[in-house]
C-alpha cells in the first residue's frame, strides 16, 4: 500500500496545477465586473433616505426629520432622536465620499444644493432621481419602504410621522471613472458578488476537469492510497452528509475569496494590517483554497466511482447504515425461522415435545386434576404441531410443482407467492419465470425485427449498394476521363452516405427497443431548444420555399430531458417536414406552456396524398412513400416516437385531409421524476 501513495500525491499536484491555472484568469477579469445601476440602487437605497435628510438639513438648518404625536413620552422621543441622529451622522460620512455626487433642485430646475464634483449624465455609472411632490410623497416609495419599516423604528412607528421634503428632486450620481479611495462607494462598486459568475464558471470548469482526471485513474489504484482507503470504509450516509456540507461551505468560501481577491478587498485589508507582500500572501492563500476544494471534489468523485466499482447493490448492503441494519434484521429473522426441511424433522419434534413435557410436568403439582390437564395439553400440542408440519410439507410440494411448471416452459400461468416459509424461494422462481418469459419475448422480437429488416428495408439497402457497385466498376475502367471519374466518385460518396445514414438509424432504433440506451437528463428550456434546432434547419425550409410561423411562450419552459436525444427528435421532425411538405406553403410551430406540461405542435400541408394510418407510420421501416422512391429509411418517425416515450413523453400524429399534424408533450421539471 505504501507504494501507491504517489497516486494521492499526483491528484494533489493536478489540483494545484488547475488552481494556478484558475489564478491566471484573475488579472483578465479584474476591473471588468463593476456593479450595475440596479445592483448599486439595491445597496444604496437603505441609506439614501438618511442621505436626503442630511442634505435637507444643510439647506434648512431648522428642518426636522420627524414629528411626534401628542402625549409621547420623553423616553420615546429620546430613543427615536438618538437613532435618527446616529443614522444621519453616518449619512454625512457617506457624503464625504467624492464618488457619491448629488444635486438637489426644485420643480423649476433651480439647484438648491450640489456636491463639489458633479459628473455629466453620460459619465455616470449610477444616475437616479428621487422626486417628492407637494405632499411630500416619494414617487418610488423610498421612504415608505425603508423608513417606516426600519427594524429599529418599527416598534415606535405609531408615535411619530416622518416630515418628508416637498417639491424637490434629489439626484444621486456615481461616476464611471470613480476614485479608488477605499471608501464606501468603491467597496460597493467593486463588491465581491460582482465576480460570482466568474467564480461559478471556474468552479464548474475545474470540477469537470477533476472529474475527467478521476475517471481516467483506475479505481483499483485509488482505493489503495490514502485518504481514499479511509473514504472507502466510511458509511455512505455519512459521506453524503459530509460531502454536501463541505462542498456547499467550500463553494461559498471560494466565491467570497475569489471575489474579494480580484476586487482588491482582501489586499486592502492586508495592507491595512501592515503586511508588505500582501499580494504574494493572497496568491498563496488562493492556491491553497482552490487546491483543497478541488481535492474535495476529487474525493467526492472517487466515492461515487467506488460505489459502481464495488457494485451498487453490494455497496448498499455492505457500506451503508441501512444495509447494516437490514443485514442484522435478516440474521435475526433467519435465526428464528431457520429449519432444514430436507432432513427428518422427527428428532427436532421430539426434542420440542420433551421440552413441553417438562413444562407440563409442572402441572402435576396440581395433583390429579393437573395431570389430566397435562395429558390433554400434550395431545393437543402434538396434533397441532403435526398439522403444522403437514402444511409445511404441502407448501414444499407446491414449490416443487412450480419448479416443474418452469421446467416445462409454461410461462403463461404466473407463480403466486402464497407461502410464508418459502416466500423467498417462490419469489426467486417468479423472477426466473419472468426472466425466461422476457428472454423468449426478446428472442421473438428479435426474430420479428430481422424479418421486418429483410422484407421492408431490403429495397433501401439494395439501392445504395447497387449504386456503389456500379460506380465502383465504372471507376475501375481506365478509359473514362478525369472529369467523369470525379463525378462518379461524388455519386459513389453520396450512395455511401445514404447507406451509412440508414444503418445509423437502424442501430438507433434497435438500441432504444432493446433498452440498451443511456440517457443524460438535464434541465433545459424546451422553447429555446426548438428554436435552436429550427435555426440549424432553416436552409432546408428555404430550399423548399416553406414559410415558418412560430409562437413561443414568454417565459422559459423548463423540462428534464436528454439534450442530444431531444435535439434528434426535433431535427427529424423538421427534416420530415422539409422533405414531404408542399413547397410554397406555411408551416406552423406552437410551443405552449400548459402549466404542468409543455406541448409542441407542428402543422404542415403534405405535397402527396396521405393514404396511411397515423399509428402505422410511426412503426419501424414504414414510410409514407410506399414506392420508396424518396430518400429515407422509414425510421425517422420511429426514432421520434422511441426517443419521446423513453423520456416519459408522448408523440401523436393527426391527419386531416392534406394537413399533417405532429404533437409532442413533455412534463415540466416540477411534475416529472426520473428514476
Image: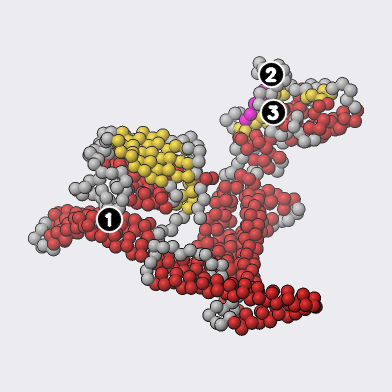
- Residues rendered magenta in the picture: 127-133
Q: CA distance from mark 2 to mark 3?
A: 13 Å
Callouts 2 and 1 close, C-beta under 8 Å: no
405 versus 591 height, above or below: below
Task: Residue at 44% x, 51% y: name it.
Answer: 647
In this figure, which residue is indicated by the disc labeled 1?
A: 502
Relative placement, left or right, of 291 versus 434 is: right
Badge 2 density bin: few <14, some 14–19, many ≥20, Cα 10 Å: some
Say whether disc 2 or disc 3 marks the residue closer to the N-terminus. 2
> Residue at image x 72%, y 27%?
143
**C-alpha span from label 3 to label 1:** 67 Å
Task: Give the label on residue 133, or none.
Answer: 2
Task: Rate crowding at label 1 as few (under 14), some (14 to 19) or many (20 or more) other CA atoms within 10 Å.
Answer: many
Quote the CA–CA distance across marks 2 and 1: 74 Å
Residue drawn 84% across the image and 23% down it: 68
Q: Is residue 128 magenta?
A: yes
Task: Say if 631 sits above or below 36 in the image.
Answer: below
User: For the residues carrying marks 2 and 1, which lies nearer the camera in this image?
Assistant: 1
Quarter occupied by residue 447: bottom left
Residue 499 relative to residue 157: left or right: left
**Which residue does the numbered mark 3 point to in the structure image?**
142
Amino acid at each position: 500500500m505504501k507504494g501507491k501513495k504517489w497516486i494521492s500525491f499526483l491528484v494533489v499536484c493536478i489540483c494545484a496545477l488547475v488552481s494556478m491555472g484558475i489564478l491566471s484568469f484573475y488579472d483578465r477579469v479584474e476591473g471588468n465586473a463593476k456593479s450595475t445601476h440596479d445592483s448599486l440602487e439595491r445597496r444604496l437605497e437603505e441609506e439614501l433616505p438618511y442621505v436626503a435628510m442630511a442634505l435637507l438639513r444643510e439647506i434648512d438648518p431648522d428642518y426636522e426629520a420627524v414629528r411626534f404625536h401628542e402625549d409621547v413620552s420623553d423616553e420615546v422621543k429620546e430613543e427615536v432622536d438618538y437613532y435618527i441622529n446616529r443614522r444621519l451622522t453616518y449619512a454625512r460620512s457617506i457624503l464625504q465620499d467624492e464618488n457619491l455626487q448629488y444635486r438637489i433642485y426644485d420643480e423649476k430646475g433651480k439647484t438648491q444644493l450640489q456636491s463639489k464634483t458633479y459628473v455629466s449624465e453620460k459619465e455616470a455609472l449610477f444616475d437616479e432621481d428621487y422626486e417628492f411632490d407637494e405632499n411630500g410623497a416619494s414617487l418610488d416609495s423610498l421612504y415608505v419602504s425603508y423608513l417606516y419599516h426600519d427594524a429599529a423604528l418599527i416598534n415606535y412607528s405609531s408615535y411619530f410621522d416622518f416630515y418628508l421634503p416637498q417639491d424637490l428632486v434629489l439626484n444621486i450620481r456615481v461616476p464611471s471613472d470613480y476614485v479608488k479611495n477605499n471608501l464606501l462607494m468603491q467597496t460597493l462598486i467593486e463588491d465581491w458578488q460582482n465576480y460570482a459568475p466568474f467564480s461559478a464558471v471556474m468552479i464548474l470548469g475545474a470540477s469537470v476537469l477533476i472529474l475527467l482526471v478521476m475517471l481516467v485513474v483506475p479505481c483499483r489504484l485509488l482505493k489503495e492510497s490514502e485518504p481514499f482507503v479511509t473514504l472507502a470504509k466510511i458509511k455512505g450516509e455519512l459521506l453524503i452528509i459530509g460531502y454536501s456540507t463541505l462542498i456547499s461551505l467550500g463553494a461559498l468560501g471560494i466565491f467570497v475569496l475569489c471575489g474579494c481577491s480580484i476586487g482588491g478587498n482582501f489586499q486592502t485589508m492586508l495592507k491595512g494590517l501592515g503586511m508588505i507582500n500582501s499580494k504574494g500572501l493572497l496568491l498563496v492563500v488562493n492556491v491553497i483554497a482552490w487546491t483543497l476544494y478541488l481535492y474535495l471534489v476529487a474525493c467526492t468523485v472517487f466515492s461515487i466511482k467506488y460505489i459502481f466499482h464495488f457494485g451498487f447493490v453490494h455497496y448498499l448492503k455492505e457500506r451503508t447504515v441501512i444495509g447494516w441494519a437490514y443485514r442484522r434484521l435478516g440474521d435475526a429473522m433467519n435465526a428464528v425461522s431457520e429449519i432444514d426441511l430436507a432432513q427428518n424433522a422427527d428428532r427436532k419434534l421430539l426434542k420440542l415435545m420433551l421440552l413441553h413435557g417438562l413444562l407440563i410436568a409442572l402441572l402435576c403439582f396440581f395433583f390429579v386434576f393437573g395431570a389430566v390437564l397435562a395429558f390433554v395439553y400434550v395431545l393437543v400440542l402434538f396434533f397441532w404441531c403435526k398439522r403444522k408440519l403437514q402444511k409445511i410439507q404441502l407448501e414444499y410440494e407446491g414449490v416443487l410443482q412450480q419448479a416443474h411448471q418452469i421446467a416445462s416452459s409454461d410461462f403463461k400461468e404466473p407463480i403466486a407467492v402464497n407461502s410464508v416459509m418459502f416466500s423467498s424461494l417462490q419469489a426467486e422462481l417468479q423472477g426466473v419465470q419472468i426472466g425466461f418469459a422476457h428472454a423468449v419475448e426478446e428472442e421473438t422480437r428479435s426474430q420479428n425485427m430481422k424479418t421486418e429488416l429483410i422484407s421492408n428495408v431490403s429495397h433501401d439497402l439494395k439501392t445504395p449498394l447497387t449504386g456503389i457497385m456500379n460506380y465502383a466498376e465504372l471507376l475501375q475502367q481506365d478509359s473514362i476521363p478525369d472529369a467523369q471519374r470525379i463525378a462518379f466518385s461524388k455519386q459513389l460518396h453520396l450512395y455511401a452516405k445514404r447507406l451509412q445514414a440508414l444503418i445509423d438509424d437502424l442501430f438507433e432504433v434497435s438500441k432504444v427497443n432493446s433498452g440498451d440506451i443511456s440517457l443524460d437528463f438535464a434541465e433545459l428550456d424546451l422553447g429555446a431548444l426548438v428554436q435552436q434546432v429550427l435555426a440549424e434547419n432553416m436552409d432546408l425550409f428555404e430550399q423548399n420555399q416553406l414559410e415558418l410561423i412560430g409562437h413561443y411562450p414568454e417565459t422559459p419552459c423548463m423540462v428534464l430531458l436528454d439534450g442530444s436525444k431531444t435535439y434528434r427528435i426535433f431535427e427529424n421532425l423538421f427534416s420530415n417536414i422539409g422533405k414531404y411538405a408542399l413547397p410554397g406553403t406555411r408551416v406552423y410551430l406552437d410551443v405552449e406552456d400548459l402549466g404542468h406540461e409543455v406541448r409542441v405542435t407542428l402543422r404542415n400541408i403534405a405535397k402527396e396524398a396521405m393514404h396511411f394510418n397515423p399509428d402505422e407510420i410511426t412503426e419501424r421501416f414504414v414510410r409514407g412513400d410506399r414506392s420508396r422512391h424518396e430518400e429515407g429509411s422509414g425510421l425517422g418517425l420511429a426514432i421520434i416516437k422511441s426517443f419521446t416515450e423513453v423520456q416519459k413523453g408522448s408523440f401523436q400524429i393527426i391527419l386531416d385531409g392534406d394537413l399533417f399534424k405532429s404533437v409532442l408533450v413533455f412534463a415540466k421539471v416540477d411534475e416529472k421524476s426520473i428514476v
